Image (cartoon, rainbow, N blue to C red):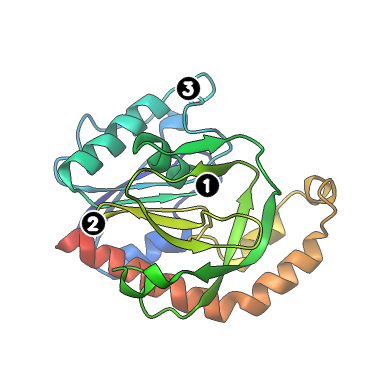
Amino acid sequence: MGRVVVVQNTQGGGPGRVGTWLRAAGADVEVVRPFDGDALPESLDGRALLVLGGGFMPDDDARAPWLPGTRRLAREALDGGTPYLGICLGGQLLAQVAGGAVRAAHGSPELGSTPIRLRPEAATDPLLHGLGSGVPAIERHVDAITELPPGAVWLASSELCPYQAFRVGPRAWGTQFHPEVSADRIARWDPAALAEHGLDRGRLLARARAAEPAAGAAWSAFTRRFAEVCRD
């Protein structure tokens, strides 16, 4: 059985359907909520690491004082070849820890269901192979990775954000998009905040629901494959 430590960075930013899929694949999932007082583990002890999203930069230690400990665990995973999956903030944190660059409020924000373009390198990737040339996924970010780490494999892009997925070494992945978020989550997004970007929540929700069958099929396969990596 694979064991996975999940770092949740905000109250509403739980593992969602990725947690459900991991458990269905036989993984033992431990969610740590440091914003709510949970202590991060001192060591992974062979467990995989999943770092979720949140409205912080990867080194925003003043607002999120658990981030140094999260970066330490990410470094442990990289150094030990332990499986790592970083989503949004978690992907940006992986990029920064491994030597890449992240910038706040960089480029155009992405909100709602977005076509993710898989690059040729994804055809042989353990998690992304066979998913086709493009898959929809939910986005919700204003910060962005601006430089991949040295030696990273660039796996996916979108129209507005080049670095949507990448791999560092054989077993560490980062995504800018949110495979854990289903379309219905958009119904809880603040309509006023969306309107500031010229977006209508109802339209975003309708587009995401139309894309949900393809997104669910692709990201459930992606997650099951990560569970297999964790077992191996």
Taking depth in this image into account, of 12 and 121 the one nearest to the observer is 121
**Quarter assignment of residue 17:** bottom left
Q: Is residue 88 left or right of residue 153?
A: right
Question: Which residue type carries mark 2?
Answer: Pro
Judged by depth in the image, the label closer to the viewer, 2 or 1, is 2
**Quarter assignment of residue 144:** top right
Pointer 2 local density, CA inside 10 Å: few below 14, some 14–19, many at least 20: some
Q: Are marks 2 and 1 in contact (CB under 8 Å)?
A: no
Q: Is residue 40 left or right of residue 63?
A: left
Residue 1 appears in the figure: no
Pointer 3 local density, CA inside 10 Å: few below 14, some 14–19, many at least 20: few
Q: Split into 4 quadrants, where in the image is the N terminus?
A: bottom left
Q: CA distance from mark 2 to mark 1?
A: 27 Å
Name the residue tied to disc 3.
Answer: 61
Q: Are marks 1 and 3 in contact (CB under 8 Å)?
A: no
Q: Is residue 102 left or right of residue 185?
A: left
Q: Percent position (x, y) of residue 79?
A: 19, 39
- Above or below, comparing residue 188 to residue 51 in the picture: below
Taking depth in this image into account, of 93 and 27 the one nearest to the observer is 93
Circle 2 SS class: loop
Mark linked to residue 13 = 1
Q: CA distance from mark 1 to mark 3?
A: 18 Å
Question: Which residue type carries mark 1?
Answer: Gly
Question: Which residue type carries mark 3?
Answer: Asp
